């Protein structure tokens, strides 16, 4: 197969203006500047003048099962404002009269006063059945009165250690459950059937392929989901390359490692590995659950004594990471606050001191990094796993984040250029369905630090902008490093497998279009087309 006439960002040399990529047996065998030599024969020639060929995007941190499930359930993604959310829930409930529970998500905190929606809004449209709706970042749920009853949540219910029940002045639950408090209700929801999980995964895979994504790290996989991935791989339906990050149960200790080893050993196939463990060390800034070295301010900018939450005790974290590292597990830590980032780096340093297996570990999110910690990523070989789309002045940032951090810490956010300057390997992931899975939107934000939907907005910490080349590398080759696929993928070069995305316009040169204005025309894995947009 020949792809001809397109710009080629090879990831391994200068951009080719109008090149030819030759694919044979699922591998790239040649990449040349100019048209194919006369007399070249190929079973299939794709004329791609005006297009751009890039290595398939790899998402270093996303949740395709959750994303797929959201698409199949009560989906509030794109519902603009409180009224629109209530209407969408009402419409979904009317359309699904047989469901015992209304389950879904995708609402956004800035659409509700204080970021906390109220149960009465749901009671007004669904009085008779429990409703459970996770917010778009997955760190809180909006529930109705029926759901609180099912969860046994009364005025006297204490907050769990890893979460908080939002209450009114009289102490009554108002309908928002933060972090671990979500479990009070979530554990009452009937388990999702295997068929539904499989459908969600397929929907997730379709969505990601349509965005040019050929491989991903699923950053939160529980046994049911791993079984769904395995079944999909066994019947040849898994067309992406997937690293499943097994969920570290923070209610348990080191004894769970045997179970994780068993899950890894039971996983097989050439597209699926379960060699990563995901540890969540803190929450998010917006609800005060990110672990901070210094206390938060309140929304009016006054000091508090609250430094957020640490989900795993620091000693245990060091022990767990050291043991997992010795067993050749990659550890993928969720760390948002500067204290959580430091905890994770300390744990990787402990593993290194204990001998160190050389496994590449990764820390995701990295919202606030103290300058002293920046060089430690390169020193420890820890990959910075960034969600570039978040580095913009959207309402959640301006209304809920900047006030509680204060100016000095606010300036330490999402320091992608500083990490690169300190020699870190920077990889990109979307955290979909927390935010858009479209890597071209993430890349544009990394380059401009503005929302592609509002390009005239003030750039967020513009000194942290990075080049288009660095952003593309983060979304391809460096994400491949997170997944241990960089020997095989992440470049358009002879010898790599033909995992490619074709964009519908030029990304370079005089006619270049902004990344987020481009769409994916075609996605290929192992030389096989897994997505093709209608012309
Ligand atoms: Zn995530």
Image (spheres, helix red, strand yellow):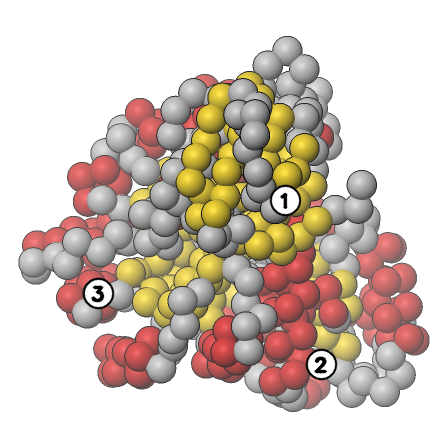
Tell me the element at label 2: helix
Kindly report the distance in space between the C-alpha atoms of the residues bearing marks 2 and 3: 42 Å
Residue 326 as seen in the image, left or right of residue 111: left
- Give the residue at mark 2: 147
Counting residues from the N terminus, which is met first, the one under dot 2 or under dot 3? 2
Q: Foreground residue, 68 or 292?
A: 68
Residue 531 in sight here:
yes
Circle number at residue 328: 3
Task: Name the quadrant containing residue 402.
Answer: top right
User: Is residue 428 or residue 369 the one in the foreground?
Assistant: 428
The image position of residue 307, as x and y in percent, is 39, 52
Q: Quadrant of the C terminus?
A: top right
* SS state under label 3: loop
Q: Which residue is mark 1?
A: 44
- Residue 213 lies, in percent from the top left, at 56, 49
Q: Is residue 406 above or below residue 118?
A: above
Q: Nearer the viewer, residue 482 or 90?
A: 482
Determine whether the beta carbon of the residue marked 3 sits less than 8 angstroms from the nearest atom of ligand 1: no
Q: Is residue 502 left or right of residue 381?
A: right
């Amino acid at each position: 197969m020949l792809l001809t006439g397109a710009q080629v960002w090879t990831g391994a040399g200068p951009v080719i203006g109008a090149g030819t990529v030759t694919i044979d047996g699922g591998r790239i065998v040649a990449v040349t500047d100019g048209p194919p030599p006369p007399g070249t024969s190929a079973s299939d020639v794709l004329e791609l003048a005006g297009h751009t060929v890039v290595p398939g995007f790899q998402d270093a941190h996303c949740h395709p099962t959750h994303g797929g499930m959201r698409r199949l359930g009560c989906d509030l993604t794109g519902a603009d404002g409180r009224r629109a959310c209530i209407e969408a829930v009402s419409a979904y409930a009317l359309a699904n009269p047989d469901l015992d529970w209304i389950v879904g998500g995708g609402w956004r905190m800035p659409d509700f006063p204080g970021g906390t929606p109220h149960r009465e809004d749901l009671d007004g449209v669904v009085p008779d059945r429990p409703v459970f709706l996770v917010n778009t970042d997955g760190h809180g749920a909006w529930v109705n009165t029926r759901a609180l009853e099912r969860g046994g949540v009364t005025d006297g219910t204490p907050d769990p250690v890893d979460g908080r029940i939002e209450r009114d002045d009289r102490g009554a639950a108002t309908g928002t459950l933060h972090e671990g408090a979500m479990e009070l209700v979530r554990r009452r929801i009937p388990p999702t059937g295997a068929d539904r999980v499989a459908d969600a995964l397929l929907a997730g895979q379709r969505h990601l392929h349509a965005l040019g994504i050929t491989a991903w790290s699923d950053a939160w996989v529980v046994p049911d989901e791993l079984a769904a991935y395995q079944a999909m791989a066994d019947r040849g339906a898994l067309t992406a390359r997937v690293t499943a990050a097994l969920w570290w149960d923070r209610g348990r200790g080191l004894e769970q490692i045997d179970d994780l080893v068993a899950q890894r050993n039971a996983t097989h196939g050439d597209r699926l590995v379960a060699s990563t463990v995901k540890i969540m060390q803190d929450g998010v800034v917006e609800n005060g659950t990110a672990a901070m070295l210094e206390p938060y301010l309140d929304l009016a900018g006054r000091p508090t004594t609250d430094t957020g939450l640490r989900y795993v005790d620091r000693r245990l974290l060091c022990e767990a990471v050291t043991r997992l590292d010795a067993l050749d597990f990659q550890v993928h830590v969720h760390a948002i606050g500067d204290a959580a980032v430091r905890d994770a780096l300390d744990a990787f340093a402990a593993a290194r001191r204990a001998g160190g297996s050389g496994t590449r570990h990764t820390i995701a999110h990295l919202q606030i990094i103290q300058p002293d910690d920046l060089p430690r990523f390169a020193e420890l070989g820890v990959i910075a796993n960034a969600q570039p789309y978040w580095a913009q002045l959207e309402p959640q940032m301006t209304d809920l984040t900047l006030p509680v951090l204060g100016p000095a810490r606010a300036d330490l956010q999402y320091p992608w250029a500083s990490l690169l300057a300190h020699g870190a390997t920077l990889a990109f992931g979307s955290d979909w369905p927390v935010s858009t899975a479209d890597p071209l939107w993430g890349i544009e934000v990394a380059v401009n630090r503005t929302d592609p939907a509002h390009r005239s907005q003030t750039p967020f910490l513009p000194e942290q902008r990075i080049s288009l080349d660095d952003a593309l590398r983060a979304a391809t080759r460096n994400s491949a490093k997170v997944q241990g696929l960089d020997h095989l993928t992440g470049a358009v070069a002879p010898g790599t497998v033909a995992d490619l995305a074709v964009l519908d316009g030029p990304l370079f040169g005089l006619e270049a279009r902004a990344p987020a204005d481009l769409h994916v025309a075609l996605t290929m894995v192992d030389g096989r087309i897994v997505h093709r947009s209608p012309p």
